[in-house]
Each structure stands twice: as C-alpha cells, then as structure tokens.
Image: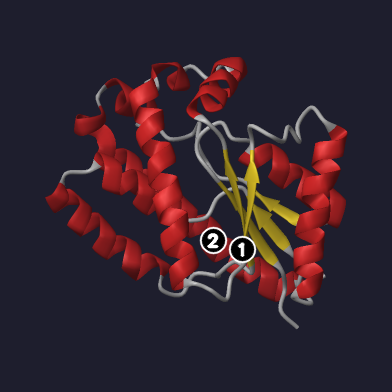
Amino acid sequence: MTVPFVTVEGPIGVGKTSLSKEIAATLNYHLLKEIVDENPFLNKFYENIEEWSFQTEMFFLCNRYKQLTDIKKFRLAHAKPVVADYHIFKNLIFAKRTLAPTEYEKYEEIYRILTKDMPVPNVVVYLHASVETLMKRIAMRGREFEKMISRDYMEQLVADYHSFIEHFESMHPEIPVIQFNGDQLDFVKNPNDLNHVLKIIKDTLQQRSLQ
C-alpha cells in the first residue's frame, strides 16, 4: 500500500504552513515544516540578493534534503502519511530567479544529484493569490526579514510559481495538483472555506485510494 505524501506549495505568505497544520490535524498526518528562520543568510539575502543568493539557496537545499531523507526513513518505519508545507522543487524556482547563470548551472547539478531518489508526493496542493493579498499577509505576520521583500520581487515570484506549476503538471501528469485561490478563500479565518478545502483534498486522496 502506498503511504500518502501530500505537499502544499505556493508563494511567500499564501498560507502553506497554516493549511499543512490543518491537514495534519484533520487527517492525522505527520507534519513536515520547512526550515526558514534558522537560515543564517536570509537577512543578508534580502539586503543584497546578488551577493548572498548562492549561500542562501545552498542552505535551504541541504536542509530540505536532510528533512526529506529523514521522512523517507520515517515513512518506511512507521507507514504514517506525511504532509509537508513545501516541495523541494521550490529550490529551483528561487535559485533560477536569484542566481547568476553560471552559479545556477552548478546549483542545478547539485540539486539533481541530491533529489534523484527523494520521496515523490502523491498529491500537490498549490495555493496562489494576488500580489496585494500576499503583501498584506506578509506585513501582518511581521517577520523582520520579510519586511525587506519588495513588490517587484513578489510579482516575479508569483509569475515564476505559475510557470513552474504548469511545467510540473506537464512533466508529472500522474500527480494531481489541486489549486486554491487565496483571494477567494480564507481557510485561516473562515471555517467554511477550510472545510471546503479539506473536503477537496480528502476526496482527491480517496479517489487515488490513498486514504
């Protein structure tokens, strides 16, 4: 039997961790949260993206690799479903935007080596929203390093995510991608919206005989 592995993805501030926590609590999944605040290069990155992008992206890649390696062992040992508030493909989204071409080539080569035998999600939940909504949510949660995120950066990131998800769907037609619009749904503050989102996710898992 395949052990369910759900990943939640989307731009900064769209609600990935909040939804992942709800999925874990409702379906009794193990929650895997990405490491963000612990990255020692993040403040420097937003102050000077060109100077600190490679160090920042390598830290994220190595830590996510370690997390997913541990999850691979965990699923084999406990046969318990997992929900993650990220997919490791996000590394390529950020790296391609911030790294110089020569650095990106090196980075992509390392990425391919590290991820070639990583666990693949059964279902991807893609959250998206307008730049206006994302900037408001980022301001509300008050992370110091996120205050340096510019609107231009967010516009590029949103466009990059849309492009990458389209590419992912074309490359992995066997993996369903469930999309939710954060401008229309507020699953953090509205219980009805949350129930709607969770029902669609549960129905998708049941259709694939994963629940």
Q: Is residue 41 above or below residue 109?
A: above
User: Is residue 179 rendered to the left or right of residue 112?
Assistant: right
Q: Residue 192: image x %, image y %?
A: 87, 37
Q: Which residue is mark 1?
A: 71
Residue 89 in sight in this render: no
Q: Quadrant of the N terminus?
A: bottom right
Category of crowding for the residue at label 1, using alpha-carbon neighbours closer than 10 angstroms: few (below 14), some (14–19), many (at least 20): some
Examine the rendered structure and indicate whether residue 15 appears above or below residue 180: above
Tell me which amino acid carries mark 2. Answer: Leu
Mark 1: amino acid = Ile
- Residue depicted at x 71% and y 79%: 2
Q: Quadrant of residue 166?
A: bottom left
Quarter residue 184 falls in: top right
In contact (CB < 8 Å): disc 2 and disc 1? yes
Of residues 144 and 40, the one drawn nearer to the viewer in this rendering? 144
Quadrant in which the C terminus appears: bottom right
Identity of the residue furthest to the bottom in this view:
1
Q: Is the residue 18 above or below the residue 23 in the image?
A: above
Mark 2–mark 1 Cα distance, whole angstroms, equals: 5 Å
**What residue do we see at 79% from left, 77% from top?**
209
How many C-alpha atoms fall within 10 Å of the one at disc 2: few (<14), some, or many (≥20)?
some
Q: Is residue 81 left or right of residue 150?
A: right
Q: Secondary structure at mark 2?
A: helix
Secondary structure beneath disc 1? helix
Q: Mark 2 sits on what residue?
A: 68
Q: Which mark is residue 190?
A: none
